[in-house]
Image (cartoon, rainbow, N blue to C red):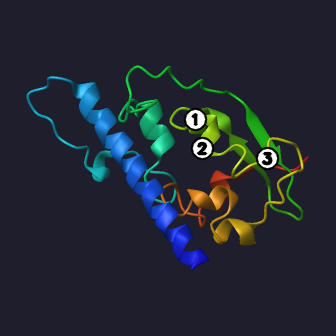
Amino acid sequence: MLKMAKWIYRISLFITFLFICIFGFYVSIGNSQQEQAIPLQILPKDNAGNVDWVKALRQGVIKPLDALDPKKPPTPVIDLDIVFKVKGDLPDVVYPHYPHTQWLACNNCHPKIFIMQAGANKISMKKIEEGQFCGRCHGVVAFPLSNCTRCHSKPKR
């Protein structure tokens, strides 16, 4: 039952994400004569051939809205990288707040998914694969977990 609830949550998160992206696209083109959705083929790809949503955002191909309510104040974008030290030979993990906060409010993740205290989150790949922590989105609506170098990107010193 708990596993089904997790999948329902993931699917609703995915549908919400897509709705915001598509709605934001239509709002951004305003009174254009031709209102068309962006075909996935024209979106930039990462090194594994998956849609690179961050690159699409940087290139202005997509313009997600802060909220569906235009009167709601914009969400602050935070330029802060969190580095998670990884045991073993793999590079350390870098979590970039900047691209995440361009389309998510802080309360999407804090404190329900991540406790805002260094060392308080006992993150592991097993937990992520089970849909916890980063696995709430990655592997569902964001790039797949098989693209290791997207997160494991900081070489050990």
As helix, strand or loop, the secondary structure at mark 1 comes to loop
* In-image side of 104 versus 88 (left or right): left
Tell me if I can see residue 138 in this picture: yes
Q: Mark 1 = which residue?
A: 105
Q: Amino acid at mark 3?
A: Ile
Q: Amino acid at mark 1?
A: Ala
As helix, strand or loop, the secondary structure at mark 2 comes to helix
In the displayed structure, 123 sits above or below 154; it is below
Q: Residues within 10 Å of mark 1 (few under 14, many from 20)?
A: some
Q: Measuring 67% from the left and 63% from the top, which residue is drawn there?
A: 132
Along the line of sight, which residue is nearer the eye, 80 or 109? 109
Q: Amino acid at mark 2?
A: Asn
Among numbered discs 3 and 2, the one appearing first in the sequence? 2
Total marks drawn?
A: 3
Q: Residues within 10 Å of mark 2 (few under 14, many from 20)?
A: few
Q: Mark 2 = which residue?
A: 108
* In-image side of 8 versus 150 (left or right): left
Answer whether labels 3 and 2 touch (C-beta < 8 Å): no
* In-image side of 39 versus 153 (left or right): left
Answer whether labels 1 and 2 touch (C-beta < 8 Å): yes
Q: Mark 3 = which residue?
A: 115
In the displayed structure, 152 sits above or below 24; it is below
Alpha carbons under labels 3 and 2: distance apart = 12 Å
Q: Measuring 37% from the left and 35% from the top, which residue is drawn there?
A: 62
Image position, residue 23 (x, y; %): 30, 38
Q: Measuring 10% from the left and 33% from the top, which residue is drawn there?
A: 34
In the displayed structure, 104 sits above or below 66; it is below
Along the line of sight, which residue is nearer the eye, 6 or 56? 6
Image position, residue 21 (x, y; %): 36, 41
Report which quarter residue 67 is drawn in.
top left
Along the line of sight, which residue is nearer the eye, 52 or 124? 124
As helix, strand or loop, the secondary structure at mark 3 comes to loop
